[in-house]
Image: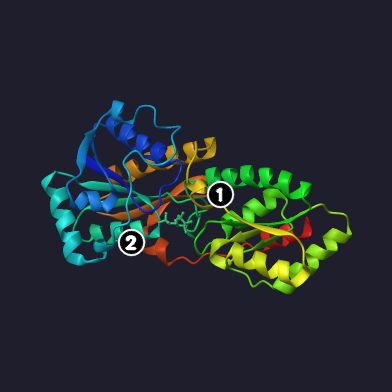
Amino acid sequence: MKKIAVLTSGGDAPGMNAAVRSVVRYALSQGVEVLGIHRGYHGLLHGEIEVLNRRSVSDIIDRGGTFLKTARCLEFKHEEVRAQAYEILKEKGVEGLVVVGGDGSFMGAYLLSKFGISTVGIPGTIDNDLPYTDYTIGFDTALNTILDSVRKLRDTSSSHERVSIVEVMGRNCGDLALYSALAGGAEAVIVPEYPFNREELCQRILDSKKNNKLHSLVILAEGAGSAEELTKYIQEKIGLDTRATVLGHIQRGGIPTARDRVMASLMGKKAVDILLKNGVCAKVVGIKDNLVFDMDIEEALKIEKNFDKDLYDLVNKLV
Ligand code: F6P
């Protein structure tokens, strides 16, 4: 293989730049030319493609976001649109494509491979919602961003002896909520994967008040409800001063942590190795037990997430 391309797709995630940098520089070290596609599949369809050299990826390893820009491309669901994308890649002499993104982006890569081009997915999403891998790029940075906010909320919330409901991102996955609740010492965590009783939560908050706790912090995953709505319920039910904070897109930005940069760099290299060693394939790379591995995209997308009930129970035991 003499020429590959790389794109970032779906929601951006801190560490995507480090992944692209690794793909570019490692591929060049193996004598392979690299094209960068701007704005994901959308940019591919519109020919937003440039040659990347070692300098193109200078000074991006510690930058959040993605310098290639990203987009969600709904048209890519149509076969004729993917056929068009394949023709554009073929015309440019591209034999392999690396896609940094989440499950929707991987599905696009898988379907594109059916035209006869190799594709490899690198997991890049703050949600950590790809069950085939223990880890997705951006999760660690987002988690630390949440914890920074939680630390600040604790100051004001304990000064006013309030209840603080913090809504975090994650789509239908509760990992950001679960890990930030554990690391942030929350009173309770509410996730989409496990049923939750609001009356019990109110009772728990009242009990901790009786035990002289100055404030209560509840982490709510966005997929499990709305902070505004829960806040209203708690105020009406037990009359305690309660505030809602929706962290929103703050969670997607920021300097990538060392962990995100290292994982991204390792997976970038692995993606290139797969393209160079395999015939036409559709693979994903991931992390299992701290080791980089790969598997077929088709298989990876079938795996269902196991909810970590032990972690959930631990949050509740450590209050
Ligand atoms: O998938 C990443 C994510 O940040 C989710 O946590 C969130 O639900 C969604 O993207 C927000 O999407 P958008 O940036 O399109 O509003």
Is label 1 or label 2 in front?
Answer: 2
Mark-to-mark CA distance, 1 and 2? 25 Å
Colour convention = rainbow
Q: Report whether residue 233 is seen.
A: yes
Residue receiving disc 2 = 107
- As drawn, is 253 to the left or to the right of 149? left
The structure residue drawn at horizontal position 42% and vertical position 49%, both measured from the top left corner, is: 124
103 or 142, which is in the foreground?
Answer: 142
Badge 2 density bin: few <14, some 14–19, many ≥20, Cα 10 Å: some
**Residue in the image at 24% along x and 58% along y:** 112
> Is the C-beta of the residue carrying label 2 under 8 Å from the nearest atom of ligand 1?
no
Q: Hey, which quadrant is residue 272 in on the image? A: top left
Q: Quadrant of ligand 1?
A: bottom left
Q: Position of residue 298 (x, y in %)?
A: 35, 63
Amino acid type of disc 2?
Answer: Met
Instruction: For the residues labelled 1 and 2, say whether their Cβ atoms are less than 8 Å apart.
Output: no
- State how many labels appear: 2
Query: Does residue 292 lie above or below 106 as drawn?
Result: above
Q: Which mark is residue 185?
A: none
Numbered tag placed on residue 289 in the rendering: 1
**SS for tag 1?**
loop
Please state which of residues 298 and 55 is positioned toward the viewer in this rendering: 55
Please state the horizontal and vertical placement of residue 107, each as a whole percent of the image.
33, 61
Which kind of residue does numbered mark 1 sit on? Asp
Position in image of residue 8 (x %, y %): 33, 47
Whether label 1 lies within 8 Å of ligand 1 gets the answer: no
